[in-house]
Image (spheres, grey):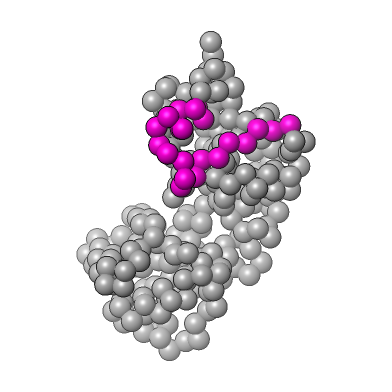
Amino acid sequence: MQQGTLYLIPCPIADETAPWEVLPAANRAVMEGLDYFIVENTRTARRFLAKAGIGPIDTLEFRELNEHTVAGSAVEELVAPLAAGRSAGVISEAGVPGVADPGALVVEACHRRGIRVVPLVGPSSILLAVMASGLNGQSFAFNGYLPVKPAERAQAIRRYERRAQSEGQTQLFIEAPYRNAKLLEELLRTLAPATRLGVAVDLTAPAERIEVRTVAEWRRAPLPELHKRPAIFLVGA
């Protein structure tokens, strides 16, 4: 029996961005050909597909894969239909699936079974931030979330700064949107004055703002309003 294909389907980063403003038209044919979706959040995925004109939504099957999914048998159950010949699409809550996203679990399971995995083109906040930063785009690292405890967080910030200085490697990380402002304040306290710090907020949205300055320059300037706005932070030499 021929196996199905796993398609990795990007979606807009910002809720207010219409799908076909940031996705290539070629993605539509793939999405219209699927009736099985493995998603991080069913409500978000249904809303995205409805905005994209895919459906009828009630004819589609959604199975969730998120931080509550137990790796192992639960993931294998999600992959079983593909092994039986049914294709599926993976959808993250925002941006591209499989990067800083639990969708990587089902991708790994498909590779183990020899199931074809096809990534589709779409907006990645990581790449957009690097592109617009002017920092090193030849060597960069996405580090996810910083530690929560203040001492460990400060230690991590200094470690990434040393890596940026010694290797020239751009360091990227994120924070929960409601803690963005606090993180920016801590970065400005911890980093050296000459270190370059980038903040990319609301990428692809009308309120998009991307700024890169030295820490010394940031300390003299009005800080952007970051509360509950998705942002990526970049540290560079």
Q: Is 45 displayed left or right of 68 in the figure?
A: right
Image position of 35 with respect to 183: above or below: above
In reply to whether residue 90 is colored magenta, the answer given is no
Q: Is residue 51 visible?
A: yes
Question: Which residue is drawn at the image coordinates 47% and 86% (left, top)?
Answer: 221
Image position of 6 with respect to 15: above or below: above
In this view, the residue in front, 38 or 26, is 38
Which span of residues is magenta-colored?
59-79
Image position of 106 with respect to 170: above or below: above
In this view, the residue in front, 62 or 109, is 62
| Residue 30 place in picture, x, y as percent | 65, 32
Image position of 77 with respect to 56: above or below: above
Number of callouts in the render?
0
Q: Is residue 26 visible?
A: no
In reply to whether residue 67 is colored magenta, the answer given is yes
In this view, the residue in front, 175 or 197, is 175
Question: Which residue is drawn at the image coordinates 54% and 45% (left, top)?
Answer: 40
Q: Quadrant of the C terminus?
A: bottom left
